[in-house]
Image: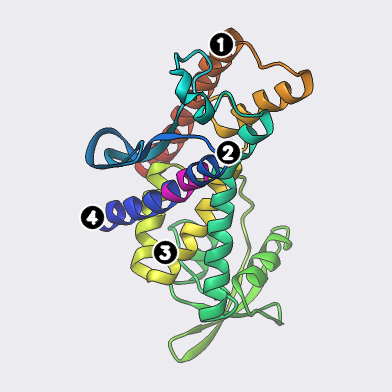
Amino acid sequence: MSVNIFALVIVLGVLIFFHELGHFLVARLLGVGVETFSLGFGPKIISKKIGITDYRISAIPLGGYVKMVGEQPDADLDPADIPLSFTHKHVFKRILIVAAGPFFNILLALIIFYGIFQISGMLILKPSIGEVNEGTPAYRTGLKKGDLVVSIDGVKISSWEDMAKMITTSKGNTLSISVFRGNSMRILDVAPEPKIFKNIFNEDMDPIMIAQMAGQEAREGAINLIFFIALISINLAILNFLPIPVLDGGHLLFFFVEAVTGRPVSIKIREIAQQAGIFVLILLMIFVFYNDIARVFLS
């Protein structure tokens, strides 16, 4: 459990830092003042003010934020601060600032993939059997954790992708699987059992599941954990581009409407949309937490 928590803090810290760094750097580049750059939410633990910006690490490491001058359209501003105001910048500058967060998550993934490729070459997952759950066709046939798949129906298997493709295209037909176990070769006949997994994003990713996977990758080694960060970073970017008002994608939607119509979306409409967006996110969080808790305790 301690490994899971430690790895989760590392993964979230890196992802959040790069996301907020994107907003921060582009905002400063385009002349917007930043009042707060926070890694985490809630009470501040450490802070240091440089210029007008308060850089801080806060107590709850489940997010972060960049608070810009004039970020709220109805905020009272000192006339001297108007040149630094986010709201008073051209709509296309505001679009760039908001989009910079998700784009920096994509950039982080590209940097990690490039670095791993330069250090370790092309990363290929070996066709090695992981956990074998009791009652599954693999369990009944005698496959065990650590078995290395060499061929399926006489076709050579070099990677996990090769193995997955052969299994998913089998349509439930019995497969002859050759595996190395220790120093001996075994041939086992397995009839794959079709299974349908349902999830909003067609994947099992939430705080609990990310914590477990982060801990697992940490135990496998630093390269695995870094590679895992890259994958989650891409997921975070995609999630933030969704047109849900409280996410970056929602803000981008409002700004694109403004760019087309020539006037900003009214504050009342924004407030209603944000309340609806929060409601949708809460429902989504309840749904994925319920699914994951049920998976942990009822499986």
> In which image quadrant can residue 296 be found?
top left
- Residue denoted by label 3: 225
- Residue denoted by label 4: 2
Question: How many neighbours does mark 2 have within 10 angstroms: few (below 14), some (14-19), or many (20 or more)?
Answer: many
The quarter of the picture where the C terminus appears is: top left
The residue at 58%/44% (across/down) is 100
Say which element carries label 1: helix
Give how far across and how far down residue 98 sits, in percent: 58, 36
> Type of residue at label 3?
Leu
Mark 3 and mark 2 lie on one chain; the one further toward the N terminus is: 2
How far apart marks 2 and 4 lie (CA) works out to 37 Å
Residue 272, disc: 1
Do tag 3 and tag 2 residues touch (Cβ < 8 Å)? no
The magenta region covers 17-23
User: Left or right of 8: which side holds 43?
Assistant: left
Mark 1 and mark 4 lie on one chain; the one further toward the N terminus is: 4
What is the count of numbered marks? 4
**Which mark is nearer the camera, 4 or 3?**
3
- Residue denoted by label 2: 97
How far apart marks 1 and 2 lie (CA) works out to 23 Å
Question: How many neighbours does mark 3 have within 10 angstroms: few (below 14), some (14-19), or many (20 or more)?
Answer: many
Please tell me whether residue 78 is drawn above or below residue 161 in the rendered image: above
